[in-house]
Amino acid sequence: MFGFGSKKNPKTMPQLAALLFEQCIDASKRFCEDIQQQLANTSFEPPTKAVFSEAILMHLWISSKILTPHQGLLDSLHDCYFRWIASQAAGTDDERRALLRSAQETLHQRYRAYYDAWDEAHAWQHNLCRLILQHLLTAGRPDRRLQNASLVAHTNISLLTFMKYVAEFRGSVGLENKA
């Protein structure tokens, strides 16, 4: 369906990860464009590059949620993310290394927080979506405006749509769900 390899012609894990990372980037761009429209009638500031970076973390987490049994693919996906971070960095080698360490810590923090907020019993992920929005829009600070049903619904739909995409991607490249 997505044109990503097949069971008869498998791609390497790094190639599959690069394709999936491109989809994370594209989905993050679409999410930011959509959220900007959603924010037009609120008191939130328009999305910035930081919001885009947070959207990428959201899409990486979604990918990790679906691909947990496939550690090699996840490792390659994270390598793509860290190469992307490094490509954005300017400065000395020490500054780039510090940026990469910070990016890794942030990734781990988000993953822990998002896994903790995930409600295995329900498709509607109200608490997770509010937490994602908190990181996207208020630099991680709680804010009553995040109760906005339209923003939460938009985030939930985006989250579930990308989860479905990653599950279909997993199947299209012949990776069985071992969980």
Image (cartoon, grey):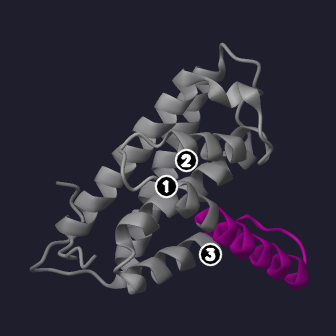
Q: Is 103 within the magenta?
A: yes
Q: Residue furthest left?
A: 8
**Residue name at image x 65 percent, y 52 percent:** 54
The residue that mark 1 highlights is: 118
Q: Secondary structure at mark 3?
A: helix
Residue 134 % position (x, y): 70, 42
Residue 143 % position (x, y): 77, 33
The amino acid type of the residue labelled 1 equals Trp
Spatial CA distance of label 3 from label 2 is 27 Å
The residue that mark 2 highlights is: 128
Q: Which residues are magenta?
A: 83-111
Circle 3 residues within 10 Å: few <14, some 14–19, many ≥20: few
The amino acid type of the residue labelled 2 equals Leu
Spatial CA distance of label 3 from label 1 is 28 Å
Residue 71 relative to residue 165: left or right: right
**Residue name at image x 58 percent, y 21 percent:** 37
**Residue name at image x 41 percent, y 73 percent:** 17
Which is more toward the observer, 33 or 115? 115
Point out the tag, 3 or 1, that comes first from the N-terminus: 3
Q: Are marks 1 and 2 in contact (CB under 8 Å)?
A: yes
The amino acid type of the residue labelled 3 equals Arg
Point out the tag, 1 or 2, that comes first from the N-terminus: 1
Q: Secondary structure at mark 1?
A: loop
Residue 19 % position (x, y): 38, 66
